[in-house]
Image: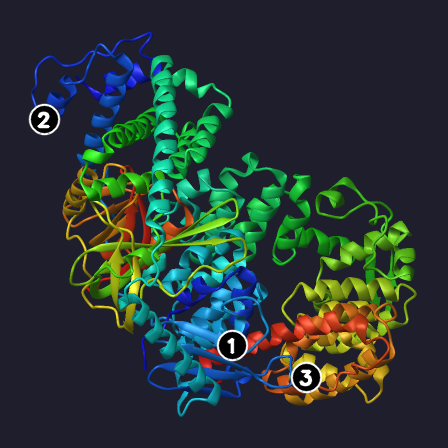
């Protein structure tokens, strides 16, 4: 059978706490008159409140699922229950011919997959009117240029009056230029300005952090002034920091990087009603890391097809840039078992070297992925660290309870830990035991 | 030129503090900085910020640990519980069915297993709040759990015996930590525990003194008597101290009580003469005799409260409670039957029976005395005593008292709820009776049934679960009153059955 998920991975799929709880209640073989599997999928029939049993199915090759129950939650409690049951009592599933509905569903999925790869190779069918497009682009450029000019004046005022006086300003002091940047079609800059406002009271080193952010904005403004003279990847970086979106479909014809990708970590940020999901992948052969973003507004579910701690054989296309990290899955071949020896950096010094290279190529970098091999989590007084075999440490971001679970897992033995480095703190997102 | 200088200028503002740029280029960073245009102070400042901050980020150096890291855990000697058992644990730690957690921990211990590492932090937190979880957790922590507990001061209560810094926990811990420490010390070194408590006795608040004193119950001996005797003047903890001393027949307190009771009871030629105490002296009060009964005690039936309104009766009752009637028999060389037969005819029978029953409950179970006193026991006293009887005795009693009539079930609900060793036969009989009772009445009319039903359902053996779920009078008019009460208890029972099955390899 295909690799299965463990209970933590399954619980992470649950759309909310009540679905997680209900899913656990469903993980009882007595509730499932039929349970079956073949090489690709598992399925079951669950007696719910309606007369006919619900049919629940999971395609393990891509971690996709379907259930005939009317629940609007996705995945529903039956799917979660079926997955938990598969993890806890695999013997309850018999290898057999799929239910008719499962066969139909798998066939439909295979068909969709073919269609997707066909559109990926086909040349774009329609091209927008090039004159209108050029006109729109130049209008946007002009609006942003004017906005950045205002921002430069504002930054100069800030430097003249000093950060101490800025600290006593009302919130509008920061929110007004942020709103101006939204109008100037630079939402990425607006976001950074709002972050600077919250960082004002971050801690003892607030002034250093703020000055660092100011420096990056200055670099962006200067870069934009020379936009035409810069190489294409740097231009892409600048538009990316400004927040100009690149349509994923425009990149479908680009060549991808095929590798066995390990899903090393995932985190979701929520701002207002917008959920942003950051999923990090690490190529086992290429040693490249990739960031897959997904956004969902309101109650729309996020894409959960990349499950942390699983491995997939896939072709990824990277968005252009001087140090490309952001990518999307162009073709997904199959889910594979995780490698015994994980890729990653052998020492913290090596990881920091890679970080220097990345910052030099892309100075606006916010979170840098680090998969650290053979490190130990540790607590010293109230500070958390990860420490490598050479006794070199990275400080961890203050984050409380999850660290105790990490420490419980390690027991002082080395493990592979994945996390994001923001230049000051390490944010662990995934961990693997190392056989010792 | 230093980053500190740039920060300082940034804080104050260029209009107050101009930026000084380096004159000579000692490295590439400084070389770039020296090219900034000083005639534009703000521009130069922004450029310096951009250059310096990026180079600082790129050149960040790793830290050294401030103290040596702890040695890793040694290999586990116990196997980890199954994934299915672990998922039950996770459910309980999420807050559902959490009443079953001590039972789950006991199962892990019975099977010689340990808890999964990933649940350790949540379990250790739960243990720091609940003493019963802390005790059940100790044997199933595994090497990993002990290693982890040693690293968090909040979990110090669970550290390996040898590594406990007793003085430190005692001086800096909260009531909970001190209680767990004393409970453990009483099992290994009772004298040390008592000395700790004795030395700092005055420094604890009344509430804490009461809690800590109760731990002396474990391995209580005459060695503890001098300390207990010495704190009888402390009114805040007097009743706890007296309670402990009455368990020690050679204690001075019990001896004084015997003298007092002997002065009041005379057994001559088959008849009993009782003299009521005339006053409650300060000495008696120091020994735990209360001058007045509690104003209104709901646990006592009305007629008993009326009886205690008579001061002499109230004082006599309290004196009797502290002296085992067996001592009386010894002194007069009579059997329990003879003494009880004499008491039966006495006008103060109620006071005598209640006092002796209380005194006997405080002693190891004495079959002869229970048999002698049983025919005279009022219902409320029997319910209290039942809980401390040995299980075979409980069983025999229940068999005698339960008849085919529903009223006998109604009268024995409290006994059934405290009986723990149900079998299939008893459960079937009781279930049938419960269904009939539930079918014909409301929760208001059956307060005892309403109160005991969840506990009784929890006593039903797991093999009857399917039967238990069915045949309830769901179409009865009053069903809605009962359904929530029954449903929740049934779910918990099913969960516990699942939990046990996970350890015994059944589905």
> Going by the image, does B160 lie left or right of B171?
left
Gap between marks 1 and 2 measured at Cα: 62 Å
Quarter of the image for the N terminus of chain B: give it.
Answer: top left
Image location (x, y in percent) of residue B82: 40, 74
Residue highlighted by disc 1: A67
N-terminal of the pair, mark 3 or mark 2, is: 2
Residue highlighted by disc 3: B468
Secondary structure under the numbered disc 1 in the rendered image: strand
Secondary structure under the numbered disc 3 in the rendered image: helix
Which residue does the image show at 90% across and 52% down from the upper left?
Answer: B309
The mark closer to the camera, 3 or 2, is 2
**How many numbered marks are there?**
3
In front of the other: B208 or B142:
B142
Which residue does the image show at 80% across and 72% down from the upper left?
Answer: B480
B280 versus B396 height, above or below: above
Crowding at mark 3 (Cα within 10 Å: few <14, some 14-19, many 20+): some
Residue highlighted by disc 2: B28
Secondary structure under the numbered disc 2 in the rendered image: helix
Which residue does the image show at 56% across and 35% down from the upper left?
Answer: B202
B128 versus A231 height, above or below: below
> Going by the image, does B132 lie left or right of A84?
right
In front of the other: B150 or B488:
B488
Residue B485: tell me if it is visible.
yes
């Amino acid at each position: 059978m295909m690799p299965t998920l463990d209970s933590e991975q399954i619980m992470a799929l649950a759309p909310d706490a009540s679905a997680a709880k209900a899913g656990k209640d469903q993980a009882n073989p007595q509730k499932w008159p039929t349970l079956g599997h073949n090489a690709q999928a598992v399925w079951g029939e669950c007696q719910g409140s309606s007369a006919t049993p619900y049919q629940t199915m999971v395609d393990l090759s891509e971690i996709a699922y379907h259930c005939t129950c009317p629940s609007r939650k996705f995945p529903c409690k039956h799917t979660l229950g079926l997955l938990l049951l598969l993890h806890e009592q695999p013997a309850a599933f018999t290898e057999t011919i799929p239910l008719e509905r499962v066969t139909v569903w798998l066939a439909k999925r295979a068909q969709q997959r073919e269609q997707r790869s066909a559109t990926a190779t086909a040349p774009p069918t329609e091209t927008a009117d090039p004159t209108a497009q050029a006109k729109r682009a130049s209008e946007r450029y002009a609006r942003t240029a004017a906005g950045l000019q205002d921002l430069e004046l504002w930054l100069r005022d800030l430097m003249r009056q000093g950060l101490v006086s800025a600290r006593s300003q009302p919130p509008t002091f920061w929110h007004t230029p942020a709103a101006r940047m939204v109008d100037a079609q630079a939402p990425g800059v607006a976001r950074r300005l709002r972050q600077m406002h919250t960082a004002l009271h971050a801690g003892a080193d607030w002034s250093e952090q703020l000055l660092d952010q100011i420096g990056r904005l200055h670099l962006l403004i200067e870069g934009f002034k020379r936009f035409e003279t810069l190489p294409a990847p740097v231009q892409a970086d600048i538009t990316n920091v400004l927040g100009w979106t690149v349509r994923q479909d425009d990149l479908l014809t680009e060549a991808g990087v095929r590798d066995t990708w390990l899903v090393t970590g995932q985190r979701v940020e929520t701002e207002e009603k917008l959920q942003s999901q950051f999923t990090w992948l690490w190529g086992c052969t290429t040693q490249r890391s990739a960031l897959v973003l997904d956004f969902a507004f309101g109650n729309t579910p996020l894409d959960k097809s990349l499950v942390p701690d699983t491995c997939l054989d896939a072709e990824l296309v990277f968005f252009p840039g001087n140090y490309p990290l952001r990518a999307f899955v162009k073709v997904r071949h199959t889910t594979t078992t995780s490698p015994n020896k994980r890729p990653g950096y052998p020492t913290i010094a090596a990881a920091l070297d890679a970080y220097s290279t990345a910052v030099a190529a892309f100075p606006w970098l916010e979170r840098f992925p680090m998969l650290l091999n053979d490190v130990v989590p540790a607590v010293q007084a109230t500070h958390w660290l990860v420490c490598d075999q050479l006794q070199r440490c990275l400080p961890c971001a203050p984050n409380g309870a999850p660290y105790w679970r990490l420490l419980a897992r390690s027991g002082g033995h080395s493990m592979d830990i994945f996390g994001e480095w923001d230049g000051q703190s390490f944010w662990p997102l995934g961990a693997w035991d190392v056989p010792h | 030129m230093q980053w500190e200088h740039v920060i300082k200028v940034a804080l104050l503002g260029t209009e107050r503090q101009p930026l000084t740029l380096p004159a000579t280029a000692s490295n590439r960073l400084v070389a770039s900085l020296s090219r900034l245009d000083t005639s534009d102070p703000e521009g130069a400042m922004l450029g310096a910020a951009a250059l310096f901050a990026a180079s600082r980020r790129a050149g960040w150096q790793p830290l050294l640990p401030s103290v040596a890291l702890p040695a890793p855990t040694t290999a586990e000697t116990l196997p980890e519980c199954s994934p299915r058992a672990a998922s039950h644990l996770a459910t309980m730690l999420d807050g559902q069915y959490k009443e079953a957690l001590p039972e789950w921990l006991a199962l892990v211990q019975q099977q010689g297993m340990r808890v999964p590492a990933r649940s350790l932090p949540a379990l250790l937190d739960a243990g720091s709040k609940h003493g019963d979880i802390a005790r059940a957790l100790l044997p199933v922590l595994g090497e990993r759990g002990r290693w982890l507990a040693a690293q968090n001061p909040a979990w110090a209560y669970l550290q390996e015996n040898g590594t406990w810094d007793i003085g430190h926990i005692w001086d800096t811990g909260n009531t909970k930590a001190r209680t767990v420490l004393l409970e453990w010390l009483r099992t290994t070194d009772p004298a040390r525990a008592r000395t700790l408590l004795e030395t700092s006795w005055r420094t604890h608040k009344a509430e804490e003194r009461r809690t800590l004193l109760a731990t002396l119950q474990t391995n209580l001996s005459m060695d503890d008597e001098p300390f207990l005797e010495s704190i009888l003047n402390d009114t805040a903890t007097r009743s706890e101290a007296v309670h402990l001393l009455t368990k020690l027949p050679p204690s001075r307190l019990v001896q004084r009580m015997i003298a007092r009771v002997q002065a009041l009871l005379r057994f001559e030629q088959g008849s009993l003469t009782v003299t009521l105490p005339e006053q409650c002296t300060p000495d008696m009060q120091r020994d735990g005799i209360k001058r007045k009964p509690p104003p209104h005690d709901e646990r006592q039936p009305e007629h008993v409260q009326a009886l205690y309104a008579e001061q002499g009766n109230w004082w006599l009752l309290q004196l009797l409670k502290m002296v085992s009637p067996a001592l009386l028999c010894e002194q007069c060389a009579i059997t329990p039957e003879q003494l009880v037969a004499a008491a039966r005819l006495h006008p103060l029978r109620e006071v005598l029976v209640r006092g002796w029953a209380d005194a006997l409950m405080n002693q190891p179970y004495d079959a002869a005395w229970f048999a002698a006193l049983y025919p005279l026991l009022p219902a409320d006293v029997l319910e209290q005593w039942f809980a401390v009887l040995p299980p075979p005795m409980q069983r025999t009693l229940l068999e005698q008292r339960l008849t085919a009539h529903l009223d006998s079930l109604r009268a024995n609900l409290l006994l059934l709820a405290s009986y723990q060793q149900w079998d299939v036969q008893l459960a079937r009989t009781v279930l049938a009776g419960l269904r009939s009772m539930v079918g014909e009445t409301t929760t208001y009319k059956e307060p005892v049934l309403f109160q005991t039903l969840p506990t009784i359902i929890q006593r039903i053996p797991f093999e009857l679960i399917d039967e238990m779920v069915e045949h309830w009078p769901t179409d009865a008019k009053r069903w809605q009153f009962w359904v929530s009460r029954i449903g929740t208890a049934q779910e918990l029972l099913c969960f516990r059955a699942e939990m046990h099955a996970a350890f015994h390899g059944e589905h």
